[in-house]
Amino acid sequence: VGIAEQQAVCSAAGLALGGLHPVVAVYSTFLNRAFDQVIMDVALHRLPVTIVLDRAGVTGPDGPSHHGMWDLSLLSVVPGLRVAAPRDPARLRELLRESLDIDGPTALRFPRAAAGPDMDAVARIDGVDILHRSRRLPLDVLIVSVGTLAEACLEAARTLEDRGVGVTVVDPRWVIPANPALAGLAARHDLVVTAEDSSRTGGAGASVAQACADAGVRTLVRNLGLPRAFIDHGDRPGLLGDAGLSG
């Protein structure tokens, strides 16, 4: 449909009503234009439409207009919509297949960045991938990694362990809405830290904090993410570092 995001999402809703499961490919930041169609044409009717969000998070040299930093904040308020954030190429393929099997609206976000190595989980609990568990150390910190920040979160875990701090690193895979299993994991730790390549205002970390509060879990939740500000041009690693999201 060209540069017409509203038309793309509305057309996808029509195709879904006709019995198909369409996939809409769009830059993350330009989904803002089609927010009304996502809510009123897709989500309201619980239609099986998958929105694939390229250039999610910090894009680097494209500048303030192209950083895909608002998608999780916007989509977190859409009823019935699930959002996945794959950490590596294997999970991108896996989660795209899963989204096409869901009879309802879904979204999948990934950054403009070189694909890193696949990172296998050591276990999966209620849909949450366990990427790292400290041995012979107390359950001090639970790190909830969103998408491709998994590598930086694992690096942070190794640094903390060198200082005698026990760490569990998890990847929820589906980050909106928050998996209820995260509240149970949070209750077993002294601190929860979430990290996302998206705005920390109303994003995946905020959903985790709300899920913990709703479950009566009193563990402190600290959310790391992009600031509530327009981010200038720059290289992706440097901009992530400026936001405190590097390893």
Image (spheres, grey):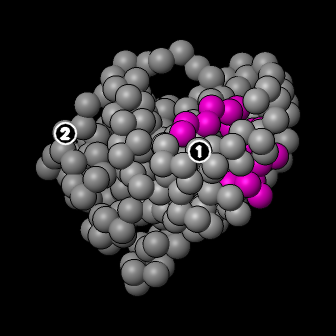
- Tell me which residue sits at (36%, 55%) in the image: 142
Q: Earlier in the sequence, mark 1 or mark 2?
A: 1
- Direction from residue 110 to residue 185 in the image, left or right: left
- Direction from residue 21 to residue 74 in the image, left or right: right
The amino acid on which the numbered mark 1 sits, given as a three-letter code, is Leu
Closer to the camera, 32 or 85? 32
Percent position of residue 10, x then y: 71, 48
- Direction from residue 115 to residue 128 in the image, left or right: left
Q: Marks 1 and 2: which is nearer the front?
A: 1
Magenta span: 22-38
- The circle on residue 15 is 1
- Tell me which residue sits at (19%, 39%) in the image: 122
- Asked whether residue 103 is in view, the answer is yes
Image quarter of residue 41: bottom right
Is 33 covered by the magenta stretch?
yes
- The circle on residue 122 is 2
- Asked whether residue 223 is in view, the answer is no
Percent position of residue 71, x then y: 67, 48
What crowding class fits label 1: few (fewer than 14 Cα within 10 Å), some (14-19), or many (20 or more)?
Answer: some
Closer to the camera, 59 or 50? 50
Percent position of residue 244, x then y: 62, 40
Percent position of residue 87, x then y: 43, 33
Label 2 residue SS: loop
- Tell me which residue sits at (14%, 49%) in the image: 136
Task: Tell me the chief SS of the magenta region.
Answer: helix
CA separation in Å, label 1 and label 2? 39 Å
Is 19 covered by the magenta stretch?
no
Which image quarter holds the N terminus?
top right
